[in-house]
Every structure is written in C-alpha cells, then in structure tokens.
Amino acid sequence: MTGSHHQGDSQGHRLDDAVLAALFSQSPVGLHVLDTQLRLIRVNAAARLMRGFPVDQMVGRPLLDVLNAFDVARPEFIERTARKVLETGEPVRDLRLHLRNRRDPAAEAVASAACFRLQDPDGTVLGLAVAITDITARAKAEGRLRMLNRAATHVGTTLDIFRTAEELCDLAVPDLADSMTVDLIDSVLRGEAPAPVAATETASLRRVGFRCADDSQQGLATVGEIGTYPFRTPYLRALSDLASVLIRNLDEDGDWLDPARRLDAWLLAAGVHSMIVTPMRARGVVLGLACLYRWRNPTPFDRDDVALVELLASRAALSLDNARVYSRERSVARILRRELRQPKAAVRSAVETAHAYVPAGAGGGWFDILPLSGARVALVVGDSSGLPISAAAAMGQVRAAIAALSDLDLSPDEILERLHDLASRPLREPEAVSPGETPDHVWSATCLYAAYDPVTGNCTISSAGHPPPAFVHASGEPELLDVPTGPPLGQGIAHYTVVERILPEGSILLLSNTELLSTGQAQGQPRLPLDRLRGLTTTAHVSLQDTCDTIVEALAPEQPSREAVLVLARPHTFDAGRTASWKLPNTPEVVSRARNVAVTQLADWGMSGLADSTALIVSELVTNAVRYANGPIKLRLIRDQALICEVTDDSSTAPHLRRADDTDEGGRGLYITAQLTDRWGVRPAPRGKTIWAEQSIPATNPGPVQDHQPWHDPD
C-alpha cells in the first residue's frame, strides 16, 4: 500500500494492516490472489461465501483448474486474459464470468471481475488480484430488458397471425426457453372475438407458432393443427383464470399428466422439468395461450421469468389482435366487394361491355353499368381509399347514391356534385360512436361518370379526381379523352365539368383506375400508356372480353398495391328503324293525332299488341303537355328491350303522381300511366322536361324492325 502517512510511519503501517484485514475479512467483494504462475494462493471471506461455492478448497490449484471446477464458460479465454494482465500490467475491468456449481448445476451465477497486477515498491511482480462481484440479479434484469427491447422491434412486424407468433417464438428460444408454442382459439383466425373459456370445459386451440431448440418435437402438434386441452390441466386453468401458471418442478407438480395424451407423453419423453403457461389477451379479448418449456436448461423458471413472459405475451397479443381485427375487416371488405362489384343490371342494347378485376387487398375499386331512361346507359368507375372495411363501406355508399341519383336523370356533373356533398359527411354520426371510439374520418373517393345515348351516339362525361378514359377508334388508334378533372369526392370545393363526345359504331371506351396507369402525367393527372395500347385493342369481330383480358395482362402490375379495375364499352348506335319522333303543335286537337301516329308506328313494328295501352299513355302525356306547356310538343317512340314513349315540352314544372277523388275532373293522367307501364319518370331537358314511360315487349311477339321514315308534323 502506497501513500503518505500523515501521523508517522508506525500509524501508517497500522492503517495498511487494517485495510488488508478488512479486504480479506469484511469486504463484500470477493477477492482472489494469484501468484505469478496463476495459482490461487489466497481468497477473502466474501469469496468463500459467494453463492455457496467452496473456493477455499481450490487454494493452490492453477487458475484453469479453478475455472473448470466451477464450470466457468470460456476458461481458456479468461486464463489468457489474466496472463496478459500479468505480463503487461494493464488492468481489466468488468470481465463477465458465467459459472455453475457442479454439485448443483441449476445454480448459475454471473460475476463481474476486475483483474490487476500486484508488485512491490521496487517493481517486482508478485502476482494478480482478482476482485469478483456477484451481478447475477443485474445480469438477469439486463437480459430481460434486452429481450423486451427486441420484442418491440421484432414481434408484430406484419399483420399476419402466424408470422407474429413465429416471431415471438424465435425471440424466446433458446434464450428464455428450450421450446415455445403459441396456440390461439380457432375463431380468432376468422377475425372473431371468442367467448371466455369456462374452467369445466375442454378447449380446442390451433397452433400458430412453434420453436424448439433441438429436434425433440416428435409428438407435438404442428403449426396449423388443432390441439385439445382437457379439464384440470394448467392450460385450461390459465385460460379460465386468465392468470399465468408456473410449474417450477414438473416431477413434484405433475399429477395432472396423462401419458395417454399426446402432449403429456411428449413432456415426459423430452424430460421437461419446468414450464410456464400464460394466457394471451388484448383489449379484453382472450386469444389463446403461450407455453414455454425447459429440459435442456437445468435452471427452473421463476417468478421473474413469469413476469417477463407476461410482458412479452401482452405485446405479442396486441399485435395478434391487430391482425385479428385486420383479418375481420379484410374478410368483410371482400364480402362487400364481391357483392357490390358486379353491375346491378346488364345493359346490352346501348353498349357491349367487358371488365377485368385484379384484387390486391387494398383500395375499393368498383364499376357500375346502370340503365337510364330513353335507352341510355351510364358507365361509372371509381376508387375509394382507406382501411379495407372503410373503403368497402365508402364504395357501397357511393354506388347506392349513384344508383339513386341516376334514377333522377341528373346530368353527370350534377350527380358528382351531390356525391361530393355526401362524401363530406362522416360514415357514422358522432352520437352513434361507442364510448372510447372516435368518429370515422370523412371518406374520399374518385369517380368518373359517363352517360351514353345510343339514339344520338353522344356521350357526356364528368370526372371527380378520377383518371380520364381512353377512346379507341374503329381503326384501332387510341386517344386519351380530354376530361377536366374536378376534386375527389369529399375534398375541396365541388366544381365539375361535362364533356361531350360522339362515340361512333365500332369504337371502344376504356375506363380504369390508377393501378393500370403509367407514371406519366397528362395535365397533372396519370394517363393510360397509349403507346402500349396500340396493338392490344382489336376489331369488332374479336371478343371484347378477350381484348379486356389482354390489356390487363399487359398493363396491370404483377403485384398491384391496390385493386386494378378495367372496363371496356363498345357503343352501339340505333338505326332509324328503331326510333320514331314527331314534332306536334301545342293545340288540343293534337292529342288524337299523336295517338294515331303512335298506333301506326307500332303496326309497322309488328307490335300492335301494345297499341291500346300505348295510345292511352300517349293521350294522357300529350294532354298533360298541352295543359301546362306553351311551345311545341315532341313525341318519340324507341324500340329497345322495352317500348319507350317520351313526350317533351318547354315546361320545367315536374308532374307528381296523385290519386284523384271520384268527383275530380282531372288528375288521373300519371296514375293511369303508372298502372300501364313498368317504369316512368321525368328527365330534365335544356329547356323544359321529358316525361317517359316504358312497357315490356311480349316475348311471343317481338315483331320485325323495319326501315320506317317517321312522320313529322308540318308545323
């Protein structure tokens, strides 16, 4: 011991002796003294008592023998380190030692060693001093903390139940357990929240995760297999009590084992001596069990291990429940999309259609083909965003609203404006939200609405944030239609523009969503790759569905991030033989003339069976126009899948159906029309309105379509 002695040499020597005596008799740090041959020559009292190891019996033995006696890990490395300190004089701090008592292999300890050289005042090397501190508790706490940190980044990386369970097992084996299983109640995999398990029941759980430190897994249920946990076992007790079960010594607490059961037979054959069974639950939902076993590691599980397993299980359970909810929403969304994806009505006279759909699990791509009045047809395509269930719900709301608004015969821009107002509202009202929940965000969607008239060949198009359609001429040359794009539904200020385009016979209209678009831009919007469309579209003699499939195969990504939708429409224009129109003066006498021309036209079409009902309908509608309008009246008949009768006047007042009293002289016109027709309605016109009515054409009397020149009133 060096240093100045302030009170004389004798007193200094006494202090040195006292310090040395305290180091060997009172110090809580274990002190080991080695000579220059690295033989243990002296230990203090703390070293003798440390973990009950009889280190004093090793005095005089080489360091390597001492290390091997206590089954210290890496003994050769530690000896080389000590020899280096002896040779260089550079001390070593916090050298970790993992040691066991061979008489009690389960008693594992972790120590921190500080090693420094001993020498006298003249520099002669006398040996080494090794101070050892028992840090077993600290080392275990650090290990638990490291495992929890790894769990935060390595468990729950996906919304896949099996992957999450596998990540948890990989984390725990072999550092914490020799094997681990994760079993979930089967309904969890279907996205359901199972009912609590009673203690008197037998539980059936499906294995979703398994990891074993060696190959001794024969007899265990494999991943995907269902296992049964009977009454009076730790498994069912943990499920019913919702508390972890610790079995430190299976030999002493294993009276429930039954060698006839598959799992119990494996426990006995593998030599499992300690186990933990922990229920997995999140958000009040019991999901299943996490089971950990030890048979290679001789140390039994303790309460600290249980606390760690519960923390790991709770974190993993939250990820598993997220996957359960996602699975439920995805399943519901798929059902909704399957039910909502197909058009509500097949319209064949005005257009021939084909479509392709590439699912991806994200987005709410959809389309509709809706019949309109006057043999017209609406082609609608859209895309909704958000979580699967939200996207599907938004898709359902938009499609239902479009169908209702289309029945009102509104123009495409008016329909989009009303849809925009609908999309600006939450999916649920705030008072409908359960406690602890937050109202759904305002949803958004894109939509393109096109209305095609086969009589005139005119198509009116309006877009709400949706990519413009492509138009393929009869020659096969593609063209991108210039359609101004308004804001997506629910975003910005509603302002939509209508574009009109004549679609000649033999052309094709292509409607799609963004997954089929290139990264190129056209006026700030994605555009279809026209150069790649050349050669993909074919003539009218080839199946339109084959053309659609060819385009999707060529343009759709192999793994789309969102659903890809493509709709092809080949328009047909009615020839003169399928329509007849007359311009009539607004006089009372014109009613009989209108009846006569309508009946004559039906006779020419071979549809005399509808002459009486049509004459009555024409009479009532023309009479209504004469009464309320001022200018000329237009009568038009269209022969489509139904017989359509239209009367147009310059009055903007829409009529209303009402029941007239017996004493009323009028008010029965629309009521009679409604009784004689399948559908009727009012369509706004640029000036005035059009009242239309449809009658079914008897299948037994289709009648020939003749070339007929309609009669026009000379006025």
Image: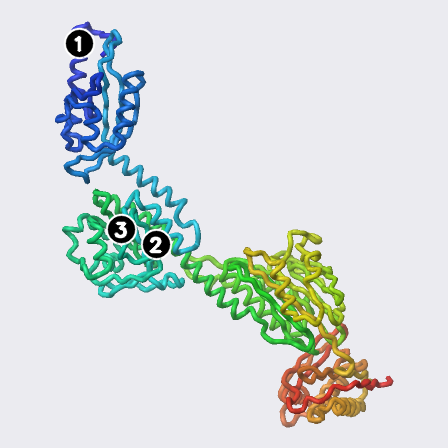
In-image side of 504 versus 132 (left or right): right
Query: Between 137 and 56, which is closer to the camera in this rendering?
Result: 56
Question: Callout 1: few (<14), some (14-19), or many (20+) C-alpha neighbours within 10 Å?
Answer: few
Closer to the chain start, of discs 2 and 1, is 1
- Residue 417 placement (x, y as % from top left): 65, 64
- Residue 437 placement (x, y as % from top left): 44, 58
**Type of the residue with mark 2:** Gly
Evaluate whether residue 606 shows in this view: yes
Q: Residue at x 72, y 79 (%)?
A: 690
**Type of the residue with mark 1:** His
Closest to the camera, between mark 1 and mark 3, is 3
Q: In this view, does 416 lie above or below 575?
A: above
Q: In which quarter of the image is the C terminus?
A: bottom right
- Residue 225 placement (x, y as % from top left): 33, 61
In-image side of 424 versus 373 (left or right): left
Residue located beneath label 1 in the image:
13
In-image side of 283 versus 62 (left or right): right
**Disc 2 vs disc 3: Cβ atoms closer than 8 Å?**
no
Closer to the chain start, of discs 1 and 3, is 1
**Disc 1 vs disc 3: Cβ atoms closer than 8 Å?**
no
Residue located beneath label 3 in the image:
216
Question: Callout 2: few (<14), some (14-19), or many (20+) C-alpha neighbours within 10 Å?
Answer: many
**Type of the residue with mark 3:** Ser
Closest to the camera, between mark 2 and mark 1, is 2
Residue at mark 2 to residue at mark 3: CA–CA distance = 16 Å
Question: Callout 3: few (<14), some (14-19), or many (20+) C-alpha neighbours within 10 Å?
Answer: few
